[in-house]
Amino acid sequence: MGSDNFAVHPVAGRIGAEIAGVDLGGQLSDEIVVRIREALIRHKVIFFRGQRLDADAQIAFARRFGELTTAHPTVPALAGHPEVLDLDYGQSSGRANNWHTDVTFVDRPPLGSILRALTIPPVGGDTLWANTIAAYQDLPAHLRSLADQLWAVHSNTFDYAAAGIDLPEDVKEYQAVFSSTVYETVHPVVRVHPESGERGLLLGGFVRHIRGLSPTEGVEIFQLLQSYVTRPENTVRWRWQEGDVVFWDNRATQHYALADYGNQARRVQRVTLVGDIPRSVEGKSSEALKGDSSLYTQRTAVAA
């Protein structure tokens, strides 16, 4: 496929661009793949309208950018497609209506995620993305220095009872599946992007505590740093249409899927690319504390 019609149109000041003139189901040239990746690194999240992909074509497109993970460490995959996470919100209670970076509870969070829209409600169901690199750059110098030294424990479990939260039964069932295998990983609060060299905040909804701080101190520091991520000027909001494909750099973003569409149908499918182990500004690597992610990242497990 040629590059004559390829065009990148920013859709917000600090994050996000729509790419036009590309059929993701076609035979993409190496040049186009390189340009898409360059746009991803620069804009953090890129949007494609009017695509007509099925699961196989979505997988084929994703493979041009790296190896794929399985659908999820704990949630079952789409039947016949072990790489595809089927998010049918008309039938499940797994609405991720909080700010998060995908799967940070494992030692190798995905490089990126590619989401395809199958069914979209006529109103509502938008998704927001936030630029975690711009957030770090916005920090005053003394906060950047503090953040550079901090490490946070991320997990897929949360004690709702201890927090005084009474979940509906269907949500409890989904959470039981989501946390059926416990994962915990300690990540640097500031990670260095392996391609751009930029520093960004690695936080989001899977953070459980800040290592070395009391629970109260940890919550306050987390909320302070997280507030820089979700400032409106660091975000972009996408109003979905059926057939849209969105590709985001999971190493430089958080996102929030709005649960504002009631009982209307909303179905999207996601594939994720195998990522690297995050490194701090001092070059130290994240460390898995609980759970073996080798099956998720499709690496050969090392025998104990």
Image (tube, helix red, strand yellow):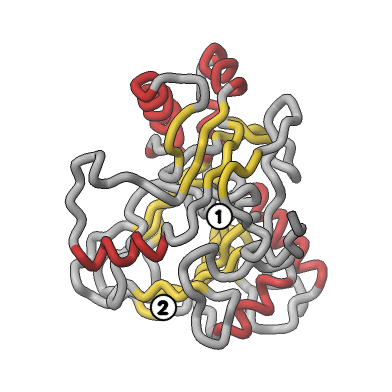
Answer left or right for 100 relative to 302: left
Q: Which mark is residue 187?
A: none
- Within 10 Å of disc 2 (Cα), the crowding (few <14, some 14-19, many 20+) is some
The quarter of the displayed image where residue 226 is located: top left
Picture coordinates of residue 24, whole percent (x, y): 63, 77
According to the picture, the residue beneath numbered tag 1 turns out to be 45
Q: Do we see residue 129 in this rendering?
A: no
According to the picture, the residue beneath numbered tag 2 turns out to be 242
**Pointer 1 and pointer 2: residues touching (CB < 8 Å)?**
no
Label 1 or label 2, whichever comes before in sequence order? 1
Between 121 and 72, the one lying in front of the other is: 72
The quarter of the displayed image where residue 90 is located: bottom left
Between 224 and 242, the one lying in front of the other is: 224
The quarter of the displayed image where residue 23 is located: bottom right
Picture coordinates of residue 91, whole percent (x, y): 29, 77
- Within 10 Å of disc 1 (Cα), the crowding (few <14, some 14-19, many 20+) is many
Quadrant into which the N terminus falls: bottom right
Q: Residue at x 43, y 37 (%)?
A: 208
Answer left or right for 236 relative to 272: left
